[in-house]
Amino acid sequence: MKTSLVTEYPLWYIIFCFLLAFLYGFLLYRKDKNFSELNINKIRLMALLRILAVFFISFLLLSPLFKSITKQIEKPIIIFAQDNSESVVINKKSEFKKQYKSKINSIINSFSEEYTIKTYTFGEKIRKNQKFEFNEKYTDFSSLFKEINNKYFNRNVGALIIASDGIYNKGTNPIYVASDINFPLYTIAMGNADAMRDVILSKVMTNKIAFLGNKFPIRAYVEMKEYKAAKTLLKVYHYKNGLGSSKTLVFSKEINAKNNDYSEIVDIELEAKQIGIQFYKIELQGLESELNLKNNTKDIIIDVVDSKQKILILANSPHPDITAIKSALEINKNYHVDFYMIKKFKENIEKYNLVILHQIPSLTNSASSFLSKLSKNEIPLLFVTGSQTSYYMLNNLILDLNIQHRRKTFDNAMPLLNENFDLFELDNNTKKFIRNAPPLLTPFGNYTFSAGSKVLLNQRIRSVKTNKPMILFNNATSTNKKIGFIVGEGLWRWKIDSYVQTKSHDVYNELINKIIQYLSIKINKDRFIVKSKRIISENETLEFKAELYNKSYELINKPNIEIIIKNSDNKSFKYSFTKTNKSYYLNAGNFPIGNYSYSSRVKIDGKVKVKSGKFAIVPVNVESENTIANHKLLYRLANENNGKMFTADQLDSLVLMINDNNNIVSIMHTEKKLENIINYKWLFFLILLLISSEWFFRKFNGTY
């Protein structure tokens, strides 16, 4: 490290500082008659102390700095990332883990002298450690690359080594994400890329809700690999009391493989005979020499309800949005949908569970008498606005939303998802669709809505994120009915775009059905409400939300709420809710797979209120669905990023290639540092010592 002194002004100004100090000290003591009889050496000592003090003070006026130059050598960084997902070791013998860990540890130790080694495991999450447990339920390459790009940007990274089977089931295609790295990428190919004999239940589709006494469909996708002319049996069981309890066979079908890569879709219809959550197991019989049996079964859950919802769509005039809404609802057997033009509607409004008003009131039809009749009952409403809507008349209804439409102009607004929306859940595919959905035609103007309203989507005008709602729900707890608003015209574009994005209308249909399902369910006026998911994946945390209301139906959270969770063995787990902003929340962590019940209680107004329910923790078997390694992906990753793919038996060659790479070298960093001398405390105390010493001698010799 080299150190030098620099000043804000020319360094030779120090001469003036010294001259100033010398003259000040010389003149002060030469003419002082109080020291005429004092020894000359003592006078010179006091003068010297004054000169030094003044010199240091005046020198600080030059803003002196210490300049230091430090040179540091940074070793090249080798990043090793291990795929820690279950698919890596499926079909492997038990001793594989131990042998593989030993090999990797020896490689890392051999690198540690000349390189800085950083180890990661990745799967569902990125972890900085060296524990290879191979128990992650998903594989996400894209999160790994984002983590490395963010953490090691502009660092001396020599190489990235990824050990994986190349199978990913979460996140973006790693080929695209890896294009951002600027250092060599080497891959270690694990798993078996050859087709194995396997019977796979690849996917099961069904409705989440069924009606008591009706039949509900189940569609099972069956694959048989390398089993030409073989037969298996598809069976469906109904659990009597939840997952793992005694079960009854309710369906079976023989599957005959006609070639070595055979697939078949099996459509099943079952009758909903019991109300509540019903558990079913779809199972493919294992065949001879089949190594992976984990992908032969799937569990599904159906919520059986005892009545259909009747929905009325009233429109001002024909519009493609009406068809888009109606078609999404009609695929759901929970709903009976009627459609009328407002001028021709003469039915009894009270028989409907929900009314959808498309561009009503309109510029040509105020529908005042009909809307007045609606306001007198508690039927939930969904207003869908557009260019025909009379926003003046809509505002006169005194709803939770008020739109001051300006100059009769409209914006093309993109949907902007509100991540804090909590009235219902949307799956990740639907959220992704919303983020890329085309714009709706929304009215230009000022929007106001009550503080208790819940916004699902806001409007994004070009690149500007606004607080103008696109889909909004009223504060249902403060009124006697639920009201929703879809502010925008062009839902038919969303339906088309959902097919473009996903090759099906499922995500669009789910969005519309979630909106209708929330609005059509009657408001729960119970003063004590406990909410939780009924079906929870084993890798999810168990969360509860609770609400407590006083007699005026206002949210309160003063009393403590406790909950007892019991598993199928009747073992109890007791928790207390955390108080949040006028509500309650509990994160109970992860629970093992199985069936559970809970009982939550609170004391209010001298009475104990109890809420009970059931839920199930279900296994996640995504990693077992596809166990054929994707070595082509690993080869492309390495080849397109100046690296090479190796097998687990070629680890020594990998070490040699990295050691022989002349581009992986240490680099020297030069760090310049400027530090203001006035910040040094010792200088302050030195000046103080000089002044104090002079004062002491002057005082000691009879003057000041």
Image (cartoon, grey):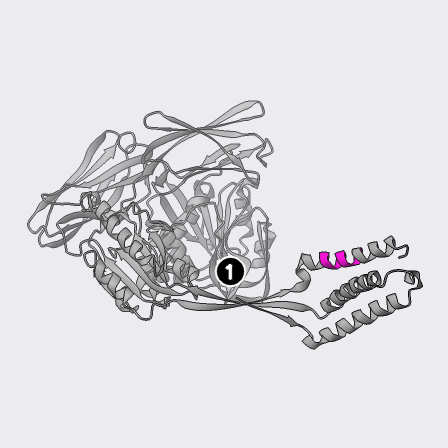
Residue 541 or 127: which is nearer the viewer? 127
Q: Mark 1 points at which residue?
A: 459
Q: Where is residue 63 in the image (x, y as percent from the top left)?
A: 69, 69
In terms of secondary structure, where does tag 1 sit?
A: strand
Label 1 environment density (alpha carbons within 10 Å; few <14, some 14–19, many ≥20):
many
Q: Position of residue 219 (x, y in %)?
A: 23, 47
The residue lying at 41 percent from left, 45 percent from top is 517
Residue 415 or 309: which is nearer the viewer? 415
Quarter in which the C terminus is drawn = bottom right
Say whether residue 36 is magenta. Answer: no
> Which portion, as a residue range, is magenta?
685-692
The image quadrant of residue 689 is: bottom right
The residue lying at 57 percent from left, 22 percent from top is 606
Looking at the image, the residue that sits furthest to the top is 606
Q: In this view, does 391 lie to the left or right of 341?
A: right
Relative to 349, does residue 683 appear above or below in the rendering?
A: below
The residue lying at 32 percent from left, 55 percent from top is 81
Q: In this view, does 89 lie to the left or right of 390?
A: left
Can residue 203 be spotted in the picture? Answer: no
Q: Position of residue 381 (x, y in %)?
A: 49, 47
What main secondary structure does the magenta stretch of the protein show? helix
Q: Position of residue 423 (x, y in %)?
A: 47, 45
Residue 467 or 689: which is nearer the viewer? 689
Relative to 337, does residue 389 appear above or below in the rendering?
A: below
Task: Please state which amino acid type lies under the numbered disc 1.
Answer: Gln
